[in-house]
Amino acid sequence: MRFVFLFCLLFFANFENSFAWKTFHNGRTVGGNLGEPHHNNFMKNDINDFERWFSQNLDHFNPTEETKWQQRYFVNDEFFDNKARNVVFLQIGGEGEASDKWMTQGAWIDYAKEYKALCFQLEHRFYGKSHPTRDLSVKNLQYLTSQQALADLAVFIEKINVQYELSPDVKWIAFGGSYPGSLAAWLRQKYPHLVHGAMSASGPLLAQLDFKDYFRVINEDLKTTSEECFKAVQQGTQQINTLLKHMVGQRKLNKLFNLCDPLEKTINNPMDISNFFETLAGNFANIAQYNKDNRIGKSATGNITLDTLCNIMINQTIGPQVHRLAVVNELTLEAYDQKCLDYKYDNMIEDLRNVSWDSEQAEGGRQWTYQTCTEFAFFQSSAYEPQLFGNNFPASFYVQQCEDIFGPKFNESYIGRAIERTNTLYGALDIQVDNVVFVHGSVDPWHALGITETKLAKAPAIYIEGTAHCANMYPPKDDDLPQLKAARKEIKKLIGTWLQQ
């Protein structure tokens, strides 16, 4: 165990970013669910400035609202056919800051070289540097919706068509991963006159209150990695439950999990206990969701895989299973440069109530929580049985967060109506589109809310066994799974077919 800790301390020493109490919340990792691509080759535009700004409407659906704001985007014209001027690729920004690294890296850039595309990336409103309002108050967050984001994209496309004097028969192809994967499909659905095709990776299309299948997939991921590992996690959770029943055990857990606040002083607060269990579950979910996907996130977790965690969980020399869970927890704390594990519910709520653009949660935590409370839910509950991590974080735990952060009107009834509205607007899993390819990985728990089997001939699904969240979007590696390599080729072929239409 000493070796594991020393290795972690040395490995993570260069990462100086420090984040608030939470590193993984509502299925979103700090920085957003689409990480930066590994930078594995050099291109002439790597030294250039891709950043631009665009005057955007605050409210697309109120003609009397004339407020404008500056939205950030990136452009790369290195591959563009200046004579034909008829192929444009658009990467859709999502629940985190957009990165200019995507302008020279990733599978879409390989496709752009092949098809001589002009490449744009539009940052999502309210994320990154795209600040439509003075702060993140609930009054201002009313303008943070998927509908407004889609309209942003539509207006952007129209303006670029004119600004760049693009061909009258220009074909735009949209790319998105995670929530932007949903947006890519919805953009093709809602604005087919502007967008000719879309690649939707790991996009959840079904809004759902109790997303209990999330941890069902995590269970399957751990079993696939190692049945012994799965049992060890389960036994470790049972041992935590036993230790919680008396003060001596509670104090032991304080030390084992390096807790910021002692459990014995909060044992009667069910919200704190729920948050403790949900955080420990997140240590595994965060790694499973991105397992071996070739991303760079806001932490050093990129080199931590399910194999890493399971090697710890089956290592009997560390001690009982609860001790092994503690080592996994320490690995996460080190990866995110955290001094201790803050599981206090009130601390979480206080952080997420901060409306300032200067707050740590303004990197996307507050915004994404708002979107889950007002459009999608996606609450990753402990309702699935048998539940590896106990049954302490039901969907009601997340509903309570919505009320406590944003106000009492954001209750279960409100969220239920919001979910129904979202599914009505977009069609959920019965979405009617063509020239869209839906891509999912079997390891990624988000595939449970997406289209993994082809329903419409012109909207095929590609389900990649053994890959995680948005894996097909990242730059290829020699050791990529054959089925991942095949998926990238199939997507490239589909795009070529669309462009010939």
Image: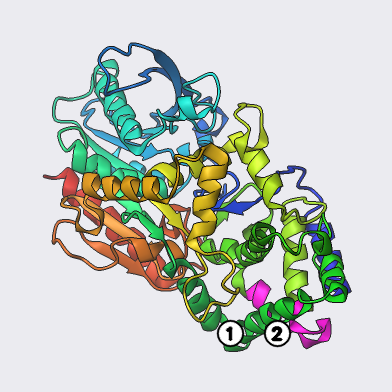
Please report the residue visible at 60 percent of the width from the left and 72 percent of the height from the top: 306
Q: Between marks 2 and 1, how big is the CA–CA gap? A: 9 Å
Crowd around label 2: few <14 · some 14–19 · many ≥20 (10 Å): many
Q: What stretch is highlighted in magenta?
A: 307-322
Amino acid type of the residue that numbered disc 1 sits on in the rendered structure: Ser
Please report the residue visible at 74 percent of the width from the left and 43 percent of the height from the top: 18
Please report the residue visible at 32 percent of the width from the left and 37 percent of the height from the top: 89
Q: Quadrant of residue 84?
A: top left
Q: Does the segment drawn in magenta span residue 312?
A: yes
Label 2: element kind:
loop
Residue 365 x, y percent position in the rendering:
57, 42
Question: Residue tagged by mark 2?
Answer: 314
Residue 239 x, y percent position in the rendering:
73, 81
Identify the mark nearer the N-term, 2 or 1: 1
Between 19 and 421, the one lying in front of the other is: 421
Please report the residue visible at 54 percent of the width from the left and 77 percent of the height from the top: 387
Q: Does the segment drawn in magenta span residue 465?
A: no
Question: In the image, is residue 399 above or below residue 225?
Answer: above
Question: Residue tagged by mark 1?
Answer: 226
Residue 447 x, y percent position in the rendering:
38, 64
Which mark identifies residue 445?
Answer: none
Discs 2, 1 touching: Cβ within 8 Å: yes
Task: Kindly report the secondary structure that dominates the magenta region of the rendered protein.
Answer: helix
Label 1: element kind:
loop
The answer, for residue 298, to whether it is visible in the render is: yes
